[in-house]
Each structure stands twice: as structure tokens, then as C-alpha cells.
Amino acid sequence: MSPESAFLKFSAEKLDQLCGRIETCVDKLSPDQIWARGNENENAIGNLMLHLAGNVRQWILHGVGGQPDHRQRDTEFDARGEIAADELKRRLRTTVDEAVALIRALPPERLSETRNIQKHYDVTVLQAIYHVVEHFSQHTGQVIFATKLLTGGDLGFYAYLRSAKAAGEETP
């Protein structure tokens, strides 16, 4: 597999994995927890989900795939609980699934093509994909941290490490 093909495969798999982790978190939270904010300068998990869907749609589906750009970024942060958990998950999953399909079908030779995104960023297709995976990962970490704070529970993403330690195996 070429490095370019490996990059596309990894990027698609990582977006899918991270989306699944957010879904796991949301399934453990009440509607009030999904929309909780410590103050107006913080974003609720619901806002982060809307923001991620908007970012992926704008950078991948529009920027790389050529779909129309209808993003209204401010509305992602203005929401205050009027969207149910199932709808938040549906919006995010639908967008991620479309982006993953686009990335998986992308010919590696297109990675060096240049795109203008958000009228301010002239980036290659590779840079656009890298930006989205990195951005998604950062906000997923915020959702995981907030979920642990709100629930006091372990999310089980690395349960296999506890099993390996108990069995006396070396862990990464």
C-alpha cells in the first residue's frame, strides 16, 4: 500500500472510530448533561457535536468533495438544548459516514490538489483531511473528558489494557 493510500485509509478509519466514541459518550448522558455549560464561554457537548458536523461537512464534503457549502458556523454554538441526543448523533454520524465514503473513494493522486476553504485557507486535499481528523480528535477528547467528569465513570475504551495488566502481559 502506498503512503498516500495508507493515509486515506487511516483517516477514514480514525474519523469513524472517533465518531463512535462520541456516540458512546452521548449514550451515557442525560439531555441536561449533553447541554451543560459551566459558563457562556464554554461549549456543551451538544454544541461540539454540531460544530464537528459543520466542520466535516465544510472541509471534506464541500472543500474536497465539491458539495454546496451551507454552513452557518455561529448557529453551532448558539444552540442551547433544543436538539435531542438521537438527532445530534444522527447528524454527526450521517456527516461522518458521507465523509468517510468520500475519503475511501478518493484517488491518492488528488491529495496534492489545492482547495480554498472558508475563504481564508488555501490547502491541499491532504491538508484538509489532516485538519479534519486532527480537529475531530481534539473535540472528541473534550467530549470524553466532559463525559468522565459528568458521570464519574470509565468509558471502557481501553479496557483491554486492564486485562493485559491483570494477565501480566506487557502493555503499550
Image (tube, helix red, strand yellow):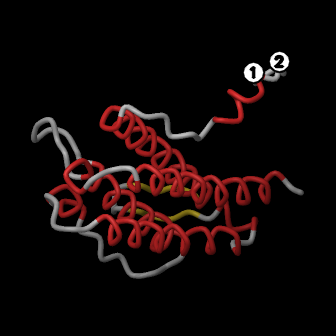
Residue 84 in the image: state x and y as whole percent.
26, 67
Q: Callout 2: 10 Å neighbours few (<14), some, many (20+)?
A: few
Residue 62 in the image: state x and y as whole percent.
45, 73
Mark 1 vs 2: CB contact within 8 A: yes
Residue shown at 49% from the left, 79% from the top: 66
Secondary structure under badge 2?
Answer: loop
Quarter of the figure with the N terminus: bottom right
* As drawn, 155 above or below 10: above
Answer left or right for 138 relative to 69. Answer: right
* As drawn, 31 above or below 135: below
Q: Of residues 147 and 4, which is closer to you in this image?
A: 147
Secondary structure under badge 1?
Answer: helix
Residue 165 in the image: state x and y as whole percent.
75, 21
Q: Callout 1: 10 Å neighbours few (<14), some, many (20+)?
A: few
When asked about the image quadrant of residue 106, the answer is bottom right
Residue shown at 11% from the left, 37% from the top: 39
Residue shown at 37% from the left, 40% from the top: 147
Give the labeled residue for mark 1.
165
Residue 129 in the image: state x and y as whole percent.
57, 57
Residue shown at 30% from the left, 37% from the top: 150
